[in-house]
Image (tube, rainbow, N blue to C red):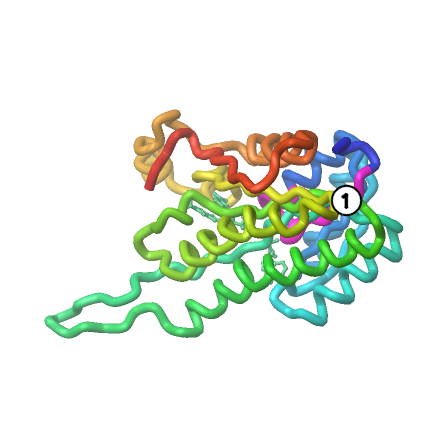
Amino acid sequence: MKVQDSVIAITGGGQGLGRAMAEFLAARGAKLALIDLVPEKLDEAAVACREAGGEARTYVCNVAKEADVESTFGAILKDFGHLNGLINNAGILRDGLMVKVKDGKVEKRMELSQWQSVIDVNLTGVFLCGREAATRMIENGDRGVIINIASISRAGNMGQSNYSAAKAGVSALVPVWAKELARYGIRCAGIAPGFVETEMTASMKPEAREKMTAGIPLRRMGRPEEIAHAAAFIFENDYLSGRMIEVDGALRL
Ligand SMILES: NC(=O)C1=CN([C@@H]2O[C@H](COP(=O)(O)OP(=O)(O)OC[C@H]3O[C@@H](n4cnc5c(N)ncnc54)[C@H](O)[C@@H]3O)[C@@H](O)[C@H]2O)C=CC1
Ligand SMILES: CC(C)c1ccc(C(=O)O)c(O)c1O
């Protein structure tokens, strides 16, 4: 599918990887529907997309809320008339060990609320947006692509019971949706990034950065545009469906 003139919704499009993917696709002529919780971030991202050469509109929405998601995708169809892509990117971290022994006593360290908040956004949010996007594409007769952003943590990372479970879940949805939606001309694939340079990692102390990158076979973190490049490849390759692409510098957790 051509990126040029395709209408692509990106959740968490206000900053970080979501914004980087939006700018990358905008430079190739995409029409972006940017979805996020934070209006100011959305406005900044939309300006950057227009400067890159694409069209962009913004939608304030909590992906974990069914009513928000339904009205947002309704508005996208009304504004653009079509929907050809969804990048399920919005995600949060609430890391912590599940249990810990302190002074000989076992403590429950990961609160249920900590578990639930990550599952709500990173897994249920992906389900709600994927279901809504597929519904609208099919109703509208649009061919389309759904991309789920996972993480190398999907393999199981210490201190990330909630996050690893959610990322394994969104990876499992990829072949499910690829099989269910192929008959409607919709493909589904995913990307599992390793550590990517973001504002957070850029502000780390040099020693901490060096320790982190020392374990990566390519000896550096990924760049946001390298993840965006993988998203564009998935979008453009019409025989790619049901699979995850790992963009992690060969790191295994
Ligand atoms: N940065 C990294 O090194 C890696 C990131 N990832 C994944 O990539 C995705 C993006 O990560 P980053 O750009 O680093 O994160 P970020 O924290 O910089 O950006 C996430 C965006 O999602 C938005 N968001 C959060 N909750 C939301 C909700 N309920 N509804 C709508 N929007 C919401 C935030 O407002 C923010 O703009 C996430 O799914 C993350 O798990 C995966 C592997 C590595
Ligand atoms: C542990 C993985 C590679 C990781 C690291 C950092 C972030 C982030 O800052 O958002 C992630 O989302 C990750 O999945």
Give the position of the C terminus as an image quadrant.
top left
* Residue 141 rendering spot, x and y as whole percentages: 83, 49
* Residue 169 rendering spot, x and y as whole percentages: 48, 55
The residue carrying pointer 1 sits among few (fewer than 14), some (14 to 19) or many (20 or more) residues within 10 Å by Cα, namely many
Q: Residue at x 42, y 58 (%)?
A: 165
As for residue 66 lying within the magenta part, the answer is: no
Name the quadrant containing residue 121: bottom right
Which amino acid lies under the numbered mark 1 shown in the image of this protein? Asn
**Mark 1, residue position:** 84
Q: Residue at x 78, y 66 (%)?
A: 71
Relative horizontal placement of residue 33, taking residue 232 as reference (left or right): right
- How many labels, in total? 1
Q: Residue at x 30, y 69 (%)?
A: 109
Give the position of the N terminus as an image quadrant.
top right
* Residue 245 rendering spot, x and y as whole percentages: 51, 35
Relative horizontal placement of residue 96, taking residue 27 as reference (left or right): left
- Nearest the viewer among 204 and 229 is 229
Is 116 rendered above or below residue 78?
A: below
Q: Of helix, strand and loop, which one carries label 1?
A: loop
As for residue 10 lying within the magenta part, the answer is: yes
Name the quadrant containing residue 218: top left
The residues colored magenta run 6-19
* Residue 111 rendering spot, x and y as whole percentages: 37, 72
Is 112 rendered above or below residue 13?
A: below
Is 117 rendered above or below residue 214?
A: below
Q: Residue at x 37, y 37 (%)?
A: 209
